[in-house]
Amino acid sequence: MAKYIKPTLDTKFHIDFSWWQQPGKNLRASLQAQVCPDSEPAAQDSEGQTFDWISPITGEVFEIDLLWHVLYKNCRSDPDFFDARIPLTSAIFRAFILNNNTPLTPVEIHDVIQKKSPEMILRTIGRGIVYEGIKPVV
């Protein structure tokens, strides 16, 4: 259904965890690519563990890799977590991790990552290609 929405700067986006349940999608691999130095030991200890995450939008419960919580807890104080060298899509994904997947507009994402303009963020995640499960909130 989200493919019929024409997103604007006021459109809220989030990580759609159901997207990650498709064959060939691996949330843990994407989360491992986001590990900051402070989370490395805990990331290794989280292997194979999950927790129940409840969507604040739908109330739906998803079983999520514990690495999500490790990153959420440990990387928020890392000043290099939004390093200028990381791709924009990774920075956006990280913004949702640090905000515990609270829906954000492109303007709010920009405020978190301080990278690229809100318009560039919208062009990146709002044109129908799904990166890292990031979709408009329906």
Image (cartoon, rainbow, N blue to C red):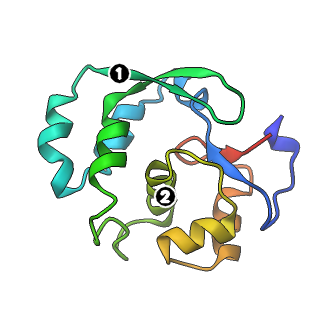
Q: Are marks 2 and 1 in contact (CB under 8 Å)?
A: no
Up-down: is 68 above or below 98?
above
Residue 26 lies left or right of residue 111; in this view the side is left
How packed mark 1 is, by other alpha carbons closer than 10 Å (few <14, some 14-19, many 20 or more), is some
Q: Amino acid at mark 2?
A: Ala
Q: Residue at image x 27%, y 65%? A: 78
Q: Residue at image x 34%, y 59%? A: 76
How packed mark 2 is, by other alpha carbons closer than 10 Å (few <14, some 14-19, many 20 or more), is many
Residue 42: image x %, image y %? 17, 38
Residue 7: image x %, image y %? 81, 57
Q: Amino acid at mark 1?
A: Thr
Outermost residue on the left side: it is: 41
* Location of mark 1 (residue): 50
Q: Nearer the viewer, residue 100 or 132?
A: 100
Up-down: is 37 above or below 88?
above
Residue 35: image x %, image y %? 26, 50
Q: Which quarter of the figure has residue 21? A: top right
Q: Residue at image x 29%, y 41%? A: 70
Separation (CA) of disc 2 from disc 1: 21 Å
Q: Nearer the viewer, residue 16 or 75?
A: 75
Residue 28 lies left or right of residue 62; in this view the side is left
Q: Tally the marks.
A: 2
Please identify the quadrant where the N terminus is shown.
Answer: top right
Point out the tag, 2 or 1, that comes first from the N-terminus.
Answer: 1
* Location of mark 2 (residue): 95
Residue 57: image x %, image y %? 70, 35
